Image (tube, helix red, strand yellow):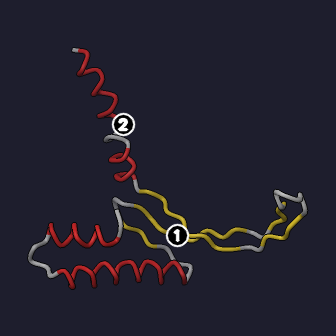
Amino acid sequence: MTRSELIAQIAHDNPHLRQQDVEAIVHVIFSEITATLARGGRVELRGFGAFSVKRRDPRIGRNPRTGEAVAVPGKAAPFFKPGKELRELVNGGPPQARAAAPAQRRA
């Protein structure tokens, strides 16, 4: 789903909101998440997941063509850890429900 599709879906699900208001809301949310991560902070959305920044130490890498050693500087990378509810939804429900489902089909 793209940002414009997200905006369209939210506007469709909430007819009392104007399209411009939905665009502004989505923009503010993404801007705040980005700004918090840029400051090295963490953003947790209960039931969805947590955004954070992971630091990568500098290292010596290799150029795949020449095999020459190359210094790779340290850097920060955004990281997302999905929450329990999101993992369960993506995997077809809670583990207990998935285990019970095949047993019900056999009966």
The N terminus sits in image quarter? bottom left
Q: Is label 1 in a helix, a strand or a loop? A: strand
Query: Label 2 sits on what residue type?
Result: Pro
The C terminus sits in image quarter? top left
| Picture mark count | 2
Query: Which labelled disc corresponds to residue 17?
Result: none
Q: Using a 10 Å C-alpha cutoff, classify the residue at mark 2 as few (fewer than 14 neighbours), some (14 to 19) or many (20 or more).
A: few
- In percent of width and height, residue 92 lies at 33, 40
| Image point (22%, 70%), residue name | 8
Q: Using a 10 Å C-alpha cutoff, classify the residue at mark 1 as few (fewer than 14 neighbours), some (14 to 19) or many (20 or more).
A: some
Rendered image quadrant of residue 28: bottom left
Query: Relative to 3, does residue 100 appear above or below in the rendering?
Result: above
Q: Is residue 100 left or right of residue 59?
A: left
| Image point (34%, 59%), residue name | 47
Query: Label 1 sits on what residue type?
Result: Ser
- In percent of width and height, residue 102 lies at 30, 23
Give yes or no for contact between labels 1 and 2 (Cβ–Cβ under 8 Å). no
Query: Relative to 8, does residue 28 appear above or below in the rendering?
Result: below
Near-viewer residue (99 or 69): 69
Q: Is residue 32 left or right of residue 38?
A: left
Q: Is label 2 in a helix, a strand or a loop? A: helix
Rendered image quadrant of residue 91: top left
Mark nearer the N terminus (1 vs 2): 1
Q: Is residue 91 left or right of residue 54?
A: left
Residue that badge 1 annotates: 52
- In percent of width and height, residue 68 lies at 90, 62
Question: Outermost residue, front direction?
Answer: 65
Residue that badge 2 annotates: 95
